[in-house]
Amino acid sequence: MSLQTYMTYVVMPILGIAALLVFYRFFRGPSVVDRVVALDLSISIGVAVIAAYCIITQQFAFLDDAMILALIAFLGTVAFSYYLTKNVKK
């Protein structure tokens, strides 16, 4: 079994199932914090899908986009946690 077939038939379906579960938590989350965590996790799953796609197709041009997307997700999570800490102290 080569790496491309493993990524296609094992990793991509697992990422698809994970995305479905995260979107369920995003829409049914009882609080805003759960929804923000689900959104951050969905972006991380998107980065993993882009990386797996690059490995499958041997075209690594999209890895730059994945890095930018991961950076935006990280900065958004940091901004939201900063907002929560400022909101709690009041």
Image (cartoon, rainbow, N blue to C red):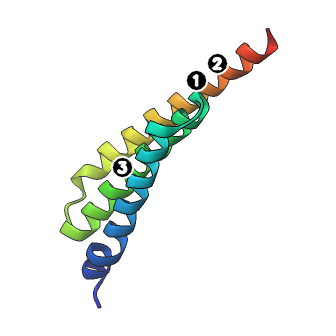
| Outermost bottom residue | 1
The part of the image, by quadrant, that contains residue 9 is: bottom left
Q: Relative to 4, does residue 82 appear above or below in the rendering?
A: above
The CA distance from mark 2 to mark 3 is 25 Å
Task: Give me the residue at 35% from left, 76% from top.
Answer: 10
Left/right of residue 61 with respect to residue 46 in the rendered view: left
| Chain-order first, disc 3 or disc 1 | 3
Task: Give me the residue at 29% from left, 91% from top.
Answer: 1
In the rendered image, residue 77, in percent from the top left (x then y), is placed at: 56, 32
Left/right of residue 59 with respect to residue 15 in the rendered view: left
Question: Dot 1, crowdedness within 10 Å: few (<14), some or many (≥20)?
Answer: few
Q: Nearer the viewer, residue 1 or 68?
A: 1
In the rendered image, residue 32, in percent from the top left (x then y), is placed at: 57, 28
Q: Relative to 82, does residue 54 appear above or below in the rendering?
A: below
In the rendered image, residue 63, in percent from the top left (x then y), is placed at: 31, 52
The CA distance from mark 1 to mark 2 is 6 Å
Q: Nearer the viewer, residue 38 or 70?
A: 38
* Discs 3, 1 touching: Cβ within 8 Å: no
* Discs 1, 2 touching: Cβ within 8 Å: yes
Question: Dot 2, crowdedness within 10 Å: few (<14), some or many (≥20)?
Answer: few
Find disc 2 in the rendering and name its residue: 83
Q: Relative to 57, does residue 67 appear above or below in the rendering?
A: above
Find disc 1 in the rendering and name its residue: 79
The part of the image, by quadrant, that contains residue 79 is: top right
| Chain-order first, disc 2 or disc 3 | 3
Find disc 3 in the rendering and name its residue: 46
The CA distance from mark 3 to mark 1 is 20 Å
Q: Secondary structure at mark 2?
A: helix
